[in-house]
Image (cartoon, coloured by chain):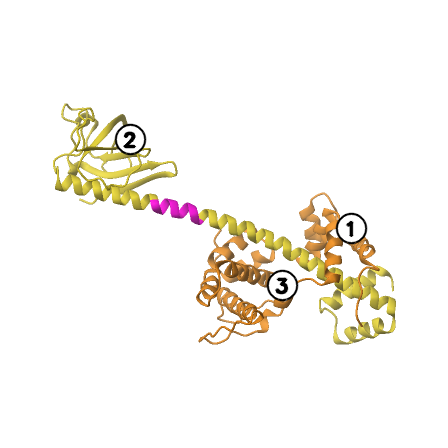
Amino acid sequence: MPFHNDRELIEAIRKKDNAAMKYLYKKHTGAIKRFVKQHGGEETEAEDIVQDVIIILFEKIVSGYFTLNPGVRLSTYMVAVGKNLYYKKCREKGKYVVDLENLPPLEDTMDIDSIINTPDQNETIVNQALQALQDICKEILIKFYYEKKSMRKIAASLGTISEENVRKHKYRCLGHLRKMITNKIYFHG
Amino acid sequence: MDKETFLDLMDKYIDGELTDTEKYNFEQMIEENLDMKNEYQIHRAIREGIQREGREKLKLQLQEIKNEVKKEEERNVFIFKILKYAAVLTAGILSVLFLIKPDFIYKDSINTQVDRIYVGQFNVKILPLEGKLGASIGQKKEIVLISDASNLYYDLNDTIYIFTRLTKHQLFAPDALKIHINQVSALSIKTNSGEYIFPLKK
């Protein structure tokens, strides 16, 4: 499916549209892969970076924090994020990449840490509780909190459930989760 | 404050949707009330967990897309390979026809001899004057290429069509087993993945 401009593509990504994601993957990730491989990265590393770039882009778009500066193309933005991710991964491995080009701005890679880091004990407990949750609960919570979809859209996507029921479900599901993890996770401060 | 209102307030705080004053009040409130602080920390941990779960789901979607794209690329490479082989075959046939037997394009394969290479089955199609694909005359003829070349690329399972501007009447004439190279308009190779037409420049 062709997208006439970046704005159209961004709107489709906001809906997590599969055709848009595929288009993004096919048309806008070649430069990132090339950059990683030209700077000593392996194919799998390049694929991981591409995946993380798309995730960051998606999360920024749905949370409403995404803006492209005038004259900047989506592909350029993605390459910049990809470069930063790669530099970060290299630094973590004690490997330093010397790039003669200008360094891209870092402000758009705020979520990188949470993508790269491995889960701690609290996170593992929450993850396990989420796995034990009913599928419908997980779906509603992910659509609401991660994909930032409205109750109306979630109800429409689920088909047989009203908007009010979705809201009640969400509240109930959070309650289940809370019960499962209370007294198991501990916080400092 | 009821639980649902507190939940909405926590969500707004986490999503940065509170004004500076609201934010300050919220922070004060949870600092002063340990139960609320605990609720907030648990909710925040849950939100982060959902974030991770959503991310995993997106990763799965991307993995499927990656696999689809990879399959498409492999298919394209295959088609490119077929086209490459077909082009080599066409060039090979033409060179042989021009250099070795310029007045000959095919003949019955019954008289197989050592210096004749079987390259597959040829179908003859009549090409209309406007040059688009014509109707098949429904007569398959086996082709023997007169050549000592052994490095031609071809696949015996492929069917090769010759498009000619000869009329049906001319084709069925007693000497129709011979078609002069000038009368051939296009070569086509039909494979499992489709038909590839190569118009011949005169």
Magenta-colored span:
B73-81
**Helix, strand or loop under label 2:** loop
Circle 2: residue type: Ala
Residue indicated by mark 2: B135
From the image, state the color of chain A.
Answer: orange
Residue indicated by mark 1: A169
Quarter of the image where one finds residue B118: top left
Q: Dot 3 surroundings within 10 Å: few (below 14), some, or many (20 or more)?
A: few
Separation (CA) of disc 3 from disc 2: 61 Å
Circle 3: residue type: Ile
Q: Is residue B146 magenta?
A: no
Q: Tell me the yellow chain.
A: B
Circle 1: residue type: His
Residue at image position (49%, 70%) is A72
Q: Is the residue at mark 3 from the same chain as the one at mark 2?
A: no
Residue at image position (35%, 47%) is B80
Residue B182 vs residue A9: left or right? left
Per the picture, the main secondary structure of the magenta-coloured stretch is: helix
2 vs 1, front mark: 1
